[in-house]
Structure formats: structure tokens, C-alpha cells
């Protein structure tokens, strides 16, 4: 099934020298990935994961997911960044943005991805009168946002169920051997799952990090892994015939021409959280050393009535990558209205998906004419198999693109800078030395 990269509209933006660069860049990135000798090569476990994953742990994930569904009305998933965006993207894409309002399954909510007291209070209120389980995801257990949320929900479960039963409702995804959270889980008897040492958080959705909440939500994790496995095999070849390298090379060629912002475009609201996962993947992988394509996203046709103006006539430093599915998840036929008060009788009995497709084509042509290059990534349909394929496709493209850019696509040194300041301002032991100096720079 796969992904088709359509670059026909780029012909007016790229010349022969750019095309020669594409071939060279793709070859270089492939060599670094296959040889495992590029920067961050100790975090390449995701490359073969769809084939080498731990079958015994996967079986435990399925059993835990079944137990959560049988004993709980609500699952609280606690994590930040890659520890929650992958699961959220899969659940919303496959079960829909209204999944928690449906009466046919477990409600899944996410915590630990912000520091809002209002959010936490409202989430706790939603748990009242319902049976609750928690899946906390953290390599160390000391990241501020999820650590605070887990402290709160751990206390909530223990006060409501007692310490022993609470322990049966807490599932921990963390380091295999070490860390604060691992030690606590061992001491309290929580069931644990592994965050692999050789897979970074933003590449971890196919591991237990993503698979436990995805499975608990009722999604077909087997089909997801099948899609990822096919992508692993089909995207293994060198050169631009490999769609992942083709996409990575195109975006780097555009970057060299001053197109420093990439907008991922979707035409389905269920894609919004997937686009958020994509933004973290590319933003955290490429934004370093004073370099990087800034990842943004829009949901069309909604944002054609807002951001569409900027895209059409604003600063010409951007390009769009459109993620388009040939078949809709569901269909609806526009009804007839004999009065034709809205003037839309020309749409009578037309599928809504056809109107959506024409909106895509119209925006593609208008934005290209306005000086915005467009890459189109076509997939057949929205389902679990395609989700797995897309995840692997973007992971491989992101790694290759980072190497083409000349950065380590697997580290995130800049993420720590704000944390040091925050710990100092909060008075954390060992961080207080610069507190006065930081305070003097703040307005009151």
C-alpha cells in the first residue's frame, strides 16, 4: 500500500542542481543509517523494531490492556512529549476525536503534559464515580510535569481504593533496570513495561510507550505493527526511489532555497494530534546548532479561513506537505434541498469526501501559484495498518533529513535549558546558585 510522494508542483521551484543535490543527500543519509555510524547512532533501535520487538512483552501489553478495559471506565495516561503524543495521535486517528464520548469503550485521558491546576482538577472531577487505572510513562520518573501528575493520581488512587488495590491499577512504563520510577514500581509491586535504551521518546510510539494505551483504547496494535513492518522492508532501499528519502531530500532542497518553515496539512480533524506528534518528531530532531526547518501544521479546510490568508500572501519562507488519504474513513451524501436557499444545488447528492478532495486540489493550485511549494504524501486510507506505516515512514524520513541537515537527529540538548532555570526559580536543592540573578531579570 505504502506512501506515494508527489512532487509535480515543485518543478517551478527546483532546478537541475537541486535535483543532483537530492541524489547525493539521499545516498549520504542512507549510508549513515545503514552503517550506524552517524551522530546518535546508539538510538537507532527503532529502525528494526517492527521485526525485533519483544514478543513476550507485547503479549503482556495485550493482557494488561484487556485487564484495564475489564476493570476500568477511565485510563489516565501520564507522560509528556514522546511519552504521550504517539498514543494520543493513534487513538484520535483510529477511534476519532469524539472517542471519549462514545459508549462503546474505555475513556482515555492524558495528564502530565502541562502544569495547569485547572486541567488537573477537571480531570480528577471526571474520574469521580468511575473506575480508574493509570499508566505513567517516564524513563526516569523525575521529569517535572509527569512526576507532579503521577504524585497526584497515585494519591487519588490510594485514597480511593487503598494502597494494595491501587497498585493493581497502576501500570508503569520506564527504564528496564534503573531510575526513580523503576525503583518505586519495584517497591510497590506495579506492573512495569520497558522504554528501550536505544529508542528515544519521539521515536517510541511503536514500543510499550505507545502500545499499552493504544491497545487499551481498543485499537488494532497488530495491524499497526504490520504496517510498520511493511514500511521497514519497503523503505530499506537507497536512493530517491525510497519515498522516505525522497521526502527528506525534497524538504532539505527547499530549505536550502530559504523555505525554512514546513506546514503539515491535513484535511481530517482526526489528524490534528498526529500532526502534533509529527511536529515534535521533526522539531526536536532538527532544531539545533542554529539550523532546522520549523514544523507547523494546519487542518484544512478549517484553517483555509484563517491561516490560509497568510499562506497565500504572507512571507514566502514556507512550504507545505499535504497528507492526503484517497479513501475517507466514512462517507456522507449531501442531501437535496428543492428550495436551494443556500445556492448549493450543484452539490446535490455529492459525497462530502468529493467536496473535500476538490478543496484540497483548489488549495494546492492556489498556494503553488502564490509561491508556496507543495509536497503531497498520498496514502490509501485511514486505518491501523496505515498508521503504523506512516509512523515508520516519518521516523525514517526524519532521521535521514536530520543527517542531510548536518545535525544529530536523536538528541535534544536545548530541552534542558529551561529546566535548569525553572528548578533554580523553584528553589530545588542544588540549583539555587543562579536564582537571584534570574529573579533580577524578571518583571514583576
Image (cartoon, rainbow, N blue to C red):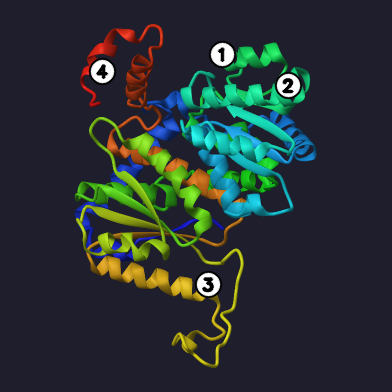
The foreground one among 282 and 399 is 282
Instruction: In the rendered view, tell whether residue 258 sits above or below residue 45.
Output: below
Instruction: In the rendered view, tell whether residue 411 sits above or below residue 261.
Output: above
Find out whether the residues at labels 4 and 2 contact each other: C-beta distance under 8 Å. no
Find out whether the residues at labels 2 and 3 contact each other: C-beta distance under 8 Å. no
Mark 1 vs mark 4: give the one in front: 4
Residue furthest to the bottom: 338
Residue furthest to the right: 70
In what quadrant of the picture does the N terminus appear?
A: bottom right
Instruction: In the rendered view, tell whether residue 189 sits above or below residue 374.
Output: above
The foreground one among 224 and 141 is 141
In what quadrant of the picture does the C terminus appear?
A: top left
Mark 3 vs mark 1: give the one in front: 1
The foreground one among 91 and 133 is 133
> Which circle's residue, 4 or 2, is located before the other in the chain?
2
> Which circle's residue, 2 or 3, is located before the other in the chain?
2
Looking at the rendered structure, the secondary structure element under dot 1 is: helix
Mark 4 vs mark 2: give the one in front: 4
> Which circle's residue, 3 or 1, is located before the other in the chain?
1
Label annotation for residue 180:
1
Instruction: In the rendered view, tell whether residue 127 sits above or below residue 247.
Output: above
- Residue drawn at x 62%, y 34% as measured from the top left: 124
Q: Which residue is mark 4?
A: 439
Q: Is residue 419 visible?
A: yes
Where residue 47 sits: x, y (%)? 51, 35
> Which circle's residue, 1 or 2, is located before the other in the chain?
2
**Disc 1 versus disc 4: distance between alpha carbons?**
30 Å
Q: Which residue is mark 3?
A: 353
Q: Which residue is mark 2?
A: 167
Where residue 327 sits: x, y (%)? 56, 67
**Disc 2 versus disc 3: distance between alpha carbons?**
47 Å
Q: Residues within 10 Å of mark 4 (few under 14, many from 20)?
A: few
Amino acid at each position: 500500500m505504502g506512501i506515494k510522494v508527489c512532487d509535480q508542483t515543485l518543478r517551478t521551484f527546483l532546478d537541475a542542481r537541486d535535483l543532483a543535490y537530492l541524489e547525493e543527500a539521499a545516498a549520504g543519509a542512507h549510508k549513515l543509517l545503514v552503517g550506524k555510524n552517524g551522530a546518535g547512532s546508539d538510538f537507532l533501535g527503532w529502525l528494526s523494531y517492527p521485526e525485533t520487538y519483544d514478543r513476550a512483552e507485547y503479549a503482556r501489553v495485550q493482557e494488561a490492556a484487556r485487564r484495564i478495559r475489564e476493570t476500568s471506565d477511565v485510563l489516565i495516561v501520564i507522560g509528556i512529549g514522546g511519552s504521550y503524543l504517539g498514543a494520543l495521535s493513534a487513538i484520535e486517528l483510529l477511534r476519532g476525536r469524539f472517542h471519549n464520548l462514545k459508549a462503546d469503550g474505555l475513556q482515555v485521558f492524558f495528564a502530565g503534559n502541562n502544569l495547569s491546576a485547572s486541567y488537573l482538577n477537571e480531570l480528577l472531577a471526571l474520574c469521580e464515580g468511575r473506575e480508574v487505572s493509570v499508566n505513567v510513562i517516564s524513563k526516569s520518573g523525575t521529569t517535572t510535569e509527569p512526576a507532579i501528575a503521577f504524585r497526584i493520581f497515585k494519591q487519588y488512587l490510594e485514597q480511593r481504593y487503598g494502597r494494595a488495590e491501587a497498585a493493581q491499577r497502576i501500570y508503569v512504563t520506564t527504564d528496564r533496570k534503573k531510575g526513580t520510577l523503576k525503583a518505586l514500581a519495584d517497591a510497590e509491586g506495579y506492573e512495569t513495561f520497558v522504554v528501550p535504551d536505544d529508542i528515544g521518546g519521539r521515536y517510541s510510539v511503536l514500543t510499550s510507550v505507545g502500545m499499552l494505551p493504544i491497545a487499551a483504547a481498543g485499537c488494532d496494535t497488530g495491524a499497526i505493527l504490520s504496517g510498520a513492518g511493511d514500511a521497514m522492508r519497503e523503505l530499506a532501499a537507497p536512493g530517491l526511489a525510497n519515498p522516505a528519502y525522497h521526502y527528506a531530500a525534497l524538504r532539505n532542497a527547499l530549505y536550502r532555497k530559504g523555505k525554512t518553515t514546513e506546514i503539515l496539512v491535513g484535511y481530517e480533524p482526526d489528524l490534528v494530534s498526529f500532526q502534533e506528534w509529527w511536529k515534535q518528531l521533526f522539531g526536536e530532531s532538527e532544531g539545533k546548532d542554529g539550523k532546522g526547518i520549523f514544523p507547523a501544521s494546519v487542518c484544512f479546510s478549517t484553517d483555509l479561513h484563517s491561516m490560509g490568508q497568510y499562506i497565500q500572501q504572507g512571507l514566502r519562507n514556507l512550504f507545505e506537505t499535504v497528507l492526503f488519504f484517497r479513501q475517507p474513513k466514512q462517507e456522507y451524501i449531501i442531501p437535496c434541498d428543492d428550495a436551494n436557499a443556500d445556492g448549493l444545488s450543484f452539490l446535490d447528492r455529492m459525497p462530502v469526501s468529493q467536496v473535500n478532495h476538490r478543496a484540497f486540489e483548489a488549495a494546492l493550485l492556489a498556494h503553488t501559484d502564490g509561491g508556496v511549494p507543495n509536497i503531497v504524501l498520498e496514502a490509501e486510507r485511514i486505518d491501523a495498518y496505515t498508521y503504523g506505516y506512516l509512523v515508520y515512514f516519518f521516523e525514517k524520513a526524519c532521521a535521514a533529513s536530520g543527517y542531510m541537515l548536518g545535525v544529530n537527529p536523536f538528541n535534544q540538548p536545548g530541552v534542558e535549558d529551561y529546566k535548569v532555570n525553572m528548578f533554580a526559580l523553584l528553589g530545588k536543592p542544588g540549583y539555587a546558585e543562579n536564582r537571584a540573578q534570574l529573579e533580577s531579570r524578571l518583571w514583576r
